[in-house]
Image (cartoon, rainbow, N blue to C red):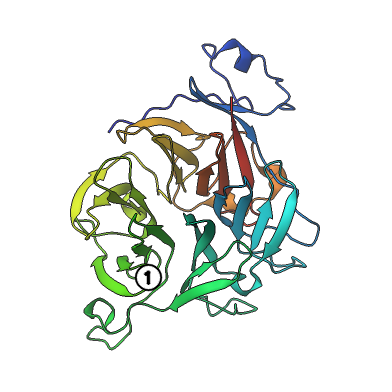
Amino acid sequence: MNATRREFLVAGVVSASAPAFIRAQDKAGTKNPILGSGEHTYEAFHDWGELPASIKWGNTHGVVEDTQGNIYVHHTVYKDSESADTMVVFDAKGKFVRSWGKEFRGVAHGLHIRKEGSEQFLYLTVNAANARLNPQPEMSAVVLKTNLKGEIVWKTQGPPPDIDAYKPGPDGKAKAYNPTNIAIAPNGDMYVGDGYGSSFVNQYNSKAEYIRTFGGRGAAAGQLAEPHGIWVDTRTSNPILVVADRRNNRLQRFTLDGKHVDFIQGFRLPCHFYEYKGDVVVPDLNGRVTLLDRNNQIIEHLGDAHEADNQFPLRTLMRDKFVPGEFICPHGACYDHEGNIFVVEWVEVGRVTKLRKV
């Protein structure tokens, strides 16, 4: 797959061939930058959402929309934030609605929303805690299901028990387990990416009962190197499991019983997925947001204004150093019901950007 780069950034140098309405934007940067082209053109609203004074963003990791149009952002919480709540909810206009989730401070990560009957539920993957993290979180290395107000329906902690994949090696050391994201099949089966642990995918049924494990660290077909994001693609009659094989800089597709199908190339540390009317948004951690069409061909790379750099020197910058129209470390993204895109970034002071479809 050949990547394309068809984007225009008002804050930087704009091509003379750019559409007139883009070139006419204010050169001083007082107007919002425009990204993309054609049917995939967006106005970027950085620092979207009216965050209450008691909450300071940490690394913003996940974002989803519920059926009422509310936006949920999962973040790790900044070190001197008065509130420890990791889940922040806004209405469609960016007004603060509520917050919860202090038990995930420092380890908040994956976020998935699903309607089941007349109710909606959130599925969260919570990282394993670093021993140096202070204070230590109440929960770590957990996958859980909650309602929209954070009340826990069920949770699983640690890897699947008594399976060969996680048995200690010859050195006697336990295999690492550190879940990053979750996907759900039409029948309710759940797939958990052990992205920061041993690079397996663990499959469970709708009751969180273990089914199988596949993947494992490597670069060959069927192997994974940091399965960070995961998604069940239902755009065709036979659903396919798609994994953001992040450190291999690719997407890898599997059958729902864990058999390798193929690769999709053209990515730079892909993080996760969200589908809308056949198009898919993939946040690329290395400074851009990628859009795919229903044939998995790249449409656009949005906000890409710097060379790939696995060291991420920009993620510790303060907000006044961010360049409008440029992404630093996109970690999560979702479409809303109108086709706008919300992007959250893995930066120390957090950032939520709304890309309003033009």
Quadrant of the rendering where the N terminus is positioned: top left
Give the quarter of the image for residue 354: top right
In-image side of 162 versus 121 (left or right):
left
Q: Is residue 254 above or below residue 326?
A: below
Q: Quadrant of residue 78?
A: bottom right
Give the percent coordinates (x, y) of residue 148: 60, 61
Q: Position of residue 296 (x, y in %)?
A: 31, 36
Q: Which residue is mark 1?
A: 197
Residue 27 horizontal side relative to residue 179, left or right: right
Residue at 37% in and 64% down: 192
Amino acid type, label 1: Gly
Instruction: Estimate the x, y position of residue 356 in percent, counting from the top left.
Output: 61, 32
**Residue 306 visible in image:** yes
Q: Position of residue 14 (x, y in %)?
A: 57, 20
Q: Is residue 327 visible?
A: no
Of helix, strand and loop, which one carries label 1? Answer: loop
Instruction: Name the quadrant of the C terminus.
Output: top right
* Residue beneath the point at 23% across and 56% down: 219
